[in-house]
Image (spheres, coloured by chain):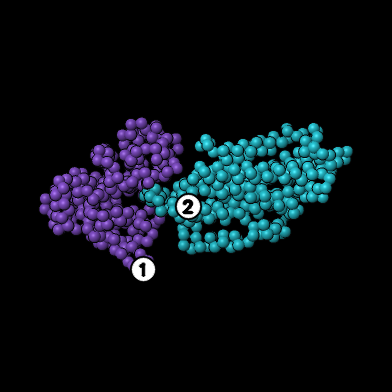
Chain colours: A purple, B cyan
Amino acid sequence: MSEQPLLEITDLRVTFDLEGRRLTAVDGAQFSVARNETAVLAGESGSGKTITALAISRLLPPNAAISSGSIRFNGHDILRMSQEELTGMRGKEIAYIFQEPVSFLNPVFTIGDQIAETIVLHQRVAPQQARRQAAQLLEQVRIPDPQRVLASYPHQLSGGMNQRAFIAMSLACQPRLLVADEPTTSLDVTIEREILDLLMELKKSLGFSLLFITHNLAIARKISDRVIIMFQGKVVDQGATDTVFRCPRHHHTRELIQAYEKIGKL
Amino acid sequence: MMKRNPYLKIGLTIIGLLMLITLFAPWLRSADPAQIDAAQLLMPPSSAHPFGTDQLGRDLLTRIIYGARISLSIGFIAMGIAVAVGILLGSLAGFYGRLVDTLIMRCADVMLCFPTFFLILAVVAFLEPSIFNIMAIIGLTSWMGPARLIRGEILSLKEREFIQAERALGASDARIILRHLVPNALGPVLVNATLGISAAILLETGLSFLGLGVQPPVPSWGNILIEAKSTLGVAWWIMIFPGLAILVTILGFNFIAEGLKKIIG
């Protein structure tokens, strides 16, 4: 592999300042995501997955800081970017989808307004043009009745619908990397499956890299090219999905896999 | 929204009617509000002058209608200024926190320490008492309430997930504040602003009554009342009708505020 990876994180350390006490949430994480690859970042709650994901476009809460390491994205050093460069990149180059779609959408605007706004944010298009694009995007995420959904407020739609709408919004500007932070955890299994299928299909047709965060090893195994296992802030295991599942190197990976085998989910 | 909300219905009816009346004032009463008629001094209510006339023979109904124009526009514009300043300062304080917050909110606290009326009196003493000055002064001394409300709302709203999502989509601070935080925080401010309009109208009335507000011959409810004071013994109507106008207007705005409070929760 001579090609440079799209995202390369080296020795990332994120510390929280809890009123004088310092807490290391991510401790020397190191991994990369190649172009068009699906990488899954897996691990139990509190292992630092989400914080790592937020650090990628410097979206950490104000009391957290990246204390060392480097994040390179598409040849740029993210830690050296100015605030304007960052806002220009967020949503356009790196987009996110989150766990609870309803609470990540603004309650006082319609889905259509929010998608159109994202388009206008990064592209020079007229509002009506943005509106048409929003309708196309909703069709792309297979929402059956785009016009109705465009005019709906988030609270009028189901969780699955909202997540589809949010995916449409995140993909509005054709990002190179989509970071999905447990996007299906709050949905029921049938919807979860639909959303996963949709993501995989969109990835194929639009060609972005996917960094998928989950605590669910069954999903990890199903969708990923590569898995990265985090435990207590450290990356303890990573590699091609099959290899990691067949011969896990770290005892925590083995524990996780065994736990899943016991309840018969793998 | 209007169902089972009698407060809002009554309030909107009163204020709606009042606005229609002020809008069509020249068609409703063809007389000039400053028209002096020496033959008609202090006439009690009659069919020609339903509210009677004052000591210069001017038609009181006409003066009250034109006074409503002044009072309502002062109420709305002063509150508009107060809400605009309040939203700006309150959202900056709430969003940026720390030093910005401390500076802005301590300023607000200092201003709240002064009784508003005396603060305004002190300022008016230095300025021309023109209608625009009165609007500006009332507006610039009433922004603290809206600012505190907005700040409080934004403090909790900015921690909500959709704000994080907006950041992740590449929205700038200004965009997050204006497009996402302020619209979500407007509810309580709307109630406050409606009450503020009636407070501003009362302030104007008070100032005019003391002779520091709208200057005669321009009619305002406050300065009609000063004239009423000297003729109270012989002409009750000059006191009663402007007083009723003020009462009904304030009631109307307070009803709207009460109704909005029920809707917003």
Q: Farthest residue in the right direction? A: B39
**Camera-side residue: A57 or A263?**
A263
Query: How far from the left and from the top, in percent, is residue B226?
Result: 77, 50
- Where residue B121 appears, as percent x and y from the top left, is 70, 58
Q: Tell me: A63 left or right of A235.
A: right
Give the residue at x 45% y 38%. Answer: A127
From the viewer's perspective, is A233 left or right of B70? left
Residue nearest the viewer, comparing A149 with B55: B55
State the residue position of label 1.
Answer: A20
Is residue A47 shown to the viewer in this render? yes
- Taking the spot 40% from the left edge, 43% from the top edge, the residue there is A118
Looking at the picture, does residue B13 appear above or below residue B218?
A: above
SS label for mark 1: loop
Q: Position of residue A109 (x, y in %)?
A: 44, 41
Asked which secondary structure carries label 2, the reply is helix
Q: Which residue is mark 2?
A: B153
Q: Is residue A186 left or right of residue B127?
A: left
Circle 2/circle 1 CB separation < 8 Å: no
Q: Quadrant of residue B64?
A: top right
Q: Which image quadrant for residue B256?
A: top right
Q: Quadrant of residue B14?
A: top right
In this picture, is A194 found above or below A80?
above
Q: Pointer 2 indicates a residue of which chain?
A: B
* Number of other residues with Cα within 10 Å of mark 2, as a class: few under 14, some 14 to 19, many 20 or more: many
Q: Label 2 is placed on what type of residue?
A: Glu
Residue at position x 72%, y 59% from top? Answer: B125
